[in-house]
Image (cartoon, helix red, strand yellow):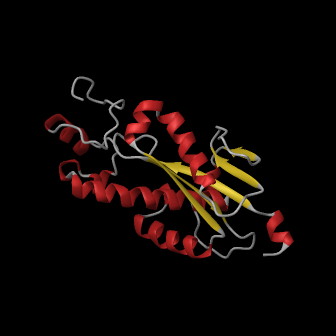
Amino acid sequence: MSNIELKRTICGVDEVGRGTLAGPVVASAVILSANHKIEGLKDSKKLTSIKRVKLSKIIQKNALSIGIGIIDATIIDKINIRQATLLAMSNSVKDLSLKPNIVLIDGVDKINIPYPQKNIIGGDSKEDSIMAASIIAKVERDKLMDIYAIAYPDFGFEKNKGYGTKFHLNALKINEPTPVHRMTFNPLKNKY
């Protein structure tokens, strides 16, 4: 890697799963080459699951470094979702194998990292590295929710990924919450 490339070591950070009733919040930090050739990067919410998985593989193959931060429901309940999200993002940056010169963060919150950082509102639609981080985080979280779907088949996690769909809410009326449910996210108020 040249000195020019090192001067352009930009990391993008994004998270997924902030608003779900179950499962972890997952963040990713991605450093792409300044002249990367990855086509089709977008906010993960604007891609089909098939396209996300395909792009995730391309990103993993071509990124200079990728870091992941995962904070489970138990910790979310202890420290609140905002703090858990910030911790997941910080952990994803700390998980990188390369040190970035600057970290671009989707949203308005600063995170606890020893690098310069810049917040970009809507960054997951503006910056390639943040788009890549969004895709990696979403694919990683979806894989976890698919595993939870096998362990807890009554809740439809393979489809709803822990979000409060009608099916999921009805399942909570019938079944006890699982260990991956966020007990502080109580949409049924008197149920769990």
Residue 126 in view here? no
| Pick the front one: 163 or 42 | 163
Left or right: 183 in relation to 46: left
Residue 131 percent coordinates (x, y): 60, 59
Residue 191 percent coordinates (x, y): 21, 27
The quarter in which the C terminus is drawn is top left
User: Compared with residue 59, is residue 86 higher up or lower down, i.e. above or below?
Assistant: above
User: Compared with residue 137, is residue 174 higher up or lower down, i.e. above or below?
Assistant: above
Q: Looking at the image, which residue sits at the far right?
A: 3
Residue at image position (36%, 57%) is 144
Left or right: 110 in relation to 8: left
Q: Looking at the image, which residue sits at the far left?
A: 174
Residue 21 percent coordinates (x, y): 34, 39
The quarter in which the N terminus is drawn is bottom right
Residue at image position (52%, 41%) is 85
Query: Residue 38 occupies which quadrant of the picture?
Result: bottom right
Residue at image position (22%, 45%) is 167
Residue 143 percent coordinates (x, y): 37, 61
Q: How many marks?
A: 0
Residue at image position (34%, 43%) is 22
Residue 23 in view here? yes
Left or right: 184 in relation to 106: left
